[in-house]
Amino acid sequence: MQHFVTYLPLIILLLSVFALMFVTASDRGVQILQLRDFSLMVTQFAKKPPLGHLRLLTIKRVVVAIVLIHLVTFFILYQVLQDRIASLLIEKEIEKVQVESLIIPYFAFFQSDYTANTGFKKSKRRTRVDIQVNGHLWSGLRLGITEVETAKISQITGKSFVFSFMTDTKKLTPAIHKHMKREVASKVIDSYELEKFDNRGPYMVVVLSEKNRSKDNQLVATGIAKRLLAELTVAMGLKVNYVVVKIADPEIYVNDKRIKVIARGTAGTY
């Protein structure tokens, strides 16, 4: 019974297509006479199958029916997904963003787990993100979106997005500067800059002090990253998962203010 319910929409669609083909057929009158005798054929079916009626199912009609079914199911699912994604934006409190084109599998209507690559637009800003779709149209669709993908949509609105697994950057930034100034004061580095945040933590660019430039730059960078991560998470109780420290070539950085990374250290898990 469960399998029958699963394929019930497909059965209804097939019956609808065949009904449409019957109504528009040029030999409809002949078919009506044949259908009138259908009750008599059913009683004789056990003795001799009515093979003559199989002639109605020509290859052309079967191909047309399959193509039509595919287009109808694809169009219905496409429209429903656009509406559901628009509702998802409202749930995420993302306003005035238009849902544009979707890229979904050709036979997504019959699949229970797939990704809908969705385009979003606000004014002249655009982005595309992956939205996970589970379930069927007739049994209920469930949409899922990661925080990383949600952040991409938030960017085109001009609003910052705070990840649940990282403290707000407004609190992290002064804490990072306070610690890095201690690194400068202790002569580990000559200078630093906070390059950016991603969804897990900060990216730092540093210029090593003269005494540390002859050491293994990767080990020094890893040590700085570990100390910064420990300061933020253990000492201050902030939420950060990952810290990246890049060692810049000192001559190029000092003379031209350009960054050429010569080593890189990390701490935490990404």
Image: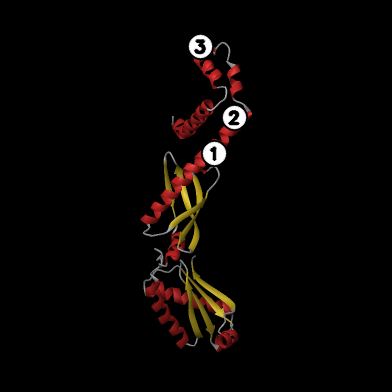
* Residue 262 visible in rendering: yes
Q: Please tell me which of labels 3 and 2 falls first in the chain.
A: 3
- Looking at the picture, which amino acid does disc 2 mark? Arg
10 Å crowding of disc 3: few (<14), some (14-19), many (20+): few
Disc number placed over residue 33 in the picture, else none: none
Disc number placed over residue 70 in the picture, else none: 1
How far apart are the two marked residues, 2 and 1, measured between alpha carbons? Answer: 14 Å
Label 3 with label 2: CB-CB less than 8 Å: no
Disc number placed over residue 61 in the picture, else none: 2
To which residue does mark 3 refer? 40
Residue at the image position 59 percent from the left and 23 percent from the top: 56
Residue 58 x, y percent position in the rendering: 62, 26
| The quadrant where residue 218 appears | bottom right
- Looking at the picture, which amino acid does disc 3 mark? Leu
Judge depth for marks 3 and 2 and give the one in front: 2
Label 2 with label 1: CB-CB less than 8 Å: no
Residue at the image position 63 percent from the left and 29 percent from the top: 59
Q: In this view, does 154 lie to the left or right of 257?
A: left
**Helix, strand, or loop for circle 1?**
helix
Between residue 91 and residue 269, name the one nearer to us. 91
Residue at the image position 36 percent from the left and 59 percent from the top: 93
